Image: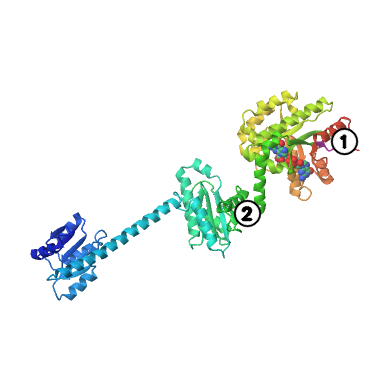
């Protein structure tokens, strides 16, 4: 569509003749008319006379070039012969070309053709730029995490791998970030609050990467990763900066970021595995108030492999009777006689030998298998007491560990009652050890269950007393029969007068509250002397005996019955 603007009709007629076969022609007799036509129609080219009444060609040109939507319409100006200065001015103002009156048909056609060819090129370019922009946007859409704008997981893996392999002279590290209790924040506040935290964190990460060497990704939920040159950041500063940034949001909840760092030693390792390693390092400190980041080392990989082995083999092991109990006596330090025992589980693995419960119990607590293992141990303990009684040995009460997960099962009491009935035991023969930290986790529910158990005649012991935090405060309304004092105390009484004092007051307090005590981990005569001096009598520890296989423990019971102490020949 060609717009011809000239106040002299004959000029318009001539031009129309030239172009009527190639263009739809629209005419206007002054600039004002022209602009209103441009407003309404998609015009491909404007031929405009410079000298006109109402609004001249310069004015049309200048208005068109000042508007985004018109500036790309080519404008060819028409001038009288020998008016060089007008031509120059029009060209400066953005005219595509000029044609001179009187019109030479060949020249005019050629010039317009050229202008259109150039213009089409321009349009193609513009279109291409728009397309490119769209593609970039689209990529951004696919590559970026929708919420925070950092790379999504897959793209992070790709980009990190490319970055590290292209820049082989630089050592890189993968840093994994996670927020403690993010779920709680989402529950306590609105989802928007959680989102705000994530977005703010992403902005912070982007800002520390602003020099361009390093990338950031969001793995899932509240997990972010960075791939950066090793040693680029002081981790303390990064965490401090992150804390300060998040605190500035004014959310009334303590939001803590934890980080794990994997210094990349093999750039060909798949990045997801690098992230796993950084994640593993992070898990080592997560929940720790003082240490907020950790570095990955190979011992962590070994731990992970071991955990996998444990999880893989546990079911089969239970079926195949690879678990058994050992019994460790609790002795009276004056009489040297066994007063009770603790059943401790042992795993005799066909290819890994004896595995310590300190290694597999935490894994089972995480994966839930501990409930089944505990029940197995309780039953073994009951069976043992039953057998010992049958064999005419006066069995002592045996305590078993009750992992906290058991308290989420409603049938705990019923299960235990069934057990003692089946093995014809009085409930006070089966003692239940509940670790102190379980009380701090969920005090009300746990106290209720414990009350119930005690009402039915079971004795409840608080295990590892003194290792947790709020224990002293809780003692006043705590329904337990016995405190088992954590071995950390007794191991320090010789070197620390503070431990000494604390131990002394715990014993006094327990007596005042009508609770008995057992001191764990006693190994030396000096410790025995001290405990004796503060009035402790019941002792569990290597000083008397290590945990023993059933048969050996029965030997101890037999001596007990004859009145022979543990240390007596
Ligand atoms: P715990 O319940 O505090 O058990 C006491 C641990 O201290 C036992 O380690 C015992 O062998 C050890 N010990 C005893 N006397 C001494 C001593 O004089 N010095 C030192 N250094 N250590 C001593 P064990 O058998 O390796 O058990 C470790 C932990 O595993 C137990 O700590 C308990 O938390 C858990 N555990 C063991 N058996 C079971 C079970 O059947 N169920 C559950 N849930 N946990 C269990
Ligand atoms: Ca215990
Ligand atoms: Ca203990």
The stretch drawn in magenta includes residue 246:
no
The residue shown at (57%, 53%) is 270
In the rendered image, which quarter contains the N terminus?
bottom left
Task: Write down which quadrant ligand 1 falls in.
Answer: top right
Q: Residue 525 in the image: x percent, y percent?
A: 84, 45
Does the CB distance between marks 2 and 1 fall below 8 Å?
no
The residue shown at (67%, 36%) is 315
Q: Is residue 315 visible?
A: yes
Q: Magenta-highlighted stretch: main secondary structure?
A: strand
Q: Which of these two is toward me, 557 or 85? A: 85
Q: Residue 206 in the image: x percent, y percent?
A: 48, 57
| Residue 319 lies in quadrant | top right
In the rendered image, which quarter contains the C terminus?
top right
| Residue 342 lies in quadrant | top right
Q: How many marks?
A: 2
Tell which circle, 2 or 1, labels the residue nearer the N-terminal end: 2
Q: CA distance from mark 2 to mark 1?
A: 50 Å
State how the image is colored: rainbow
Q: Secondary structure at mark 1?
A: loop
Q: In the image, which residues are magenta?
A: 330-334
Q: Which of these two is toward me, 532 or 380? A: 380
**Tag of residue 296:** 2
**Tag of residue 565:** 1
Position of residue 126 in the picture relative to residue 339 (left or right): left
Position of residue 519 in the picture relative to residue 212 (left or right): right
The residue shown at (35%, 56%) is 131
Q: Residue 440 in the image: x percent, y percent?
A: 63, 39
């Amino acid at each position: 569509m060609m717009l011809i603007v000239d106040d002299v009709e004959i000029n318009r007629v001539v031009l129309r003749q030239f172009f009527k076969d190639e263009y739809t022609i629209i005419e206007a007799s002054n600039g004002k008319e022209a602009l209103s036509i441009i407003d309404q129609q998609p015009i491909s080219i404007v031929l405009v006379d410079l000298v006109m009444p109402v609004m001249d060609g310069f004015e049309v040109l200048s208005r068109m070039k000042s508007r985004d939507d018109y500036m790309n319409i080519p404008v060819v100006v028409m001038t009288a012969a020998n008016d060089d200065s007008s031509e120059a001015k029009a060209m400066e103002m953005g005219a595509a070309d000029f044609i001179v009156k009187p019109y030479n048909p060949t020249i005019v056609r050629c010039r317009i053709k050229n202008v259109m060819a150039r213009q089409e090129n321009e349009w193609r370019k513009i279109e291409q730029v728009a397309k490119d922009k769209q593609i970039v946007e689209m990529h951004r859409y696919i590559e970026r995490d929708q919420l925070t704008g950092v790379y999504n997981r897959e793209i992070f893996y790709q980009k990190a791998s490319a970055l590290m392999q292209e820049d082989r002279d630089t050592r890189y590290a993968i840093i994994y970030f996670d927020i403690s209790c993010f779920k709680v924040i989402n529950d306590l506040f609105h989802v928007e609050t959680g989102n705000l935290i994530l977005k703010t964190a992403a902005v912070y990460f982007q800002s520390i990467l602003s020099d361009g060497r390093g990338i950031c990704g969001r793995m899932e939920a509240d997990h972010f990763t960075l791939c950066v040159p090793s040693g680029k950041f002081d981790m303390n500063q990064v965490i401090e900066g992150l804390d300060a940034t998040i605190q500035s949001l004014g959310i009334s909840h303590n939001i803590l970021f934890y980080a794990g760092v994997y210094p990349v030693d093999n750039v060909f390792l798949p990045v997801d595995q690098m992230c796993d390693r950084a994640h593993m390092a992070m898990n080592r400190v997560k929940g720790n108030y003082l240490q907020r980041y950790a570095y990955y080392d190979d011992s962590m990989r070994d731990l992970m492999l071991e955990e996998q082995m444990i999880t893989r083999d546990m079911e089969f092991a239970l079926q195949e009777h690879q678990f058994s109990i050992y019994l460790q006596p609790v002795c009276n330090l004056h009489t040297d006689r066994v007063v009770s025992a603790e059943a401790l589980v042992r795993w005799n693995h066909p290819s890994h030998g004896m595995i310590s419960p300190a290694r597999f119990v935490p894994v089972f607590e995480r994966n839930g298998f501990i409930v089944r293992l505990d029940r197995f141990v309780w039953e073994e303990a009951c069976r043992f007491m039953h057998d010992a009684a049958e064999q005419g040995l006066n069995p002592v009460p045996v305590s078993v560990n009750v992992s906290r997960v058991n308290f989420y099962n409603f049938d705990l009491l019923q299960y235990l009652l069934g057990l003692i009935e089946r093995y014809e035991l009085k409930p006070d023969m089966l003692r239940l050890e509940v670790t102190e930290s379980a009380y701090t986790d969920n005090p009300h529910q746990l106290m209720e269950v414990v009350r119930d158990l005690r009402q039915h005649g079971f004795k409840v012991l608080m295990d590892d007393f003194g290792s947790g935090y709020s224990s002293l405060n809780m003692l006043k309304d705590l329904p337990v029969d016995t405190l088992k004092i954590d071995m950390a105390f007794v191991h320090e009484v010789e070197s620390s007068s503070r431990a000494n004092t604390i131990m002394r007051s715990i014993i006094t307090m327990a007596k005042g509250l009508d609770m008995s005590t057992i001191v764990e981990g006693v190994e030396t005569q000096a410790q025995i002397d001290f405990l004796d001096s503060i009035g402790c009598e019941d002792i569990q520890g290597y000083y008397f005996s290590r945990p023993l296989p059933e048969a050996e423990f029965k030997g101890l019971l037999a001596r007990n019955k004859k009145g022979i102490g543990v240390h007596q020949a």
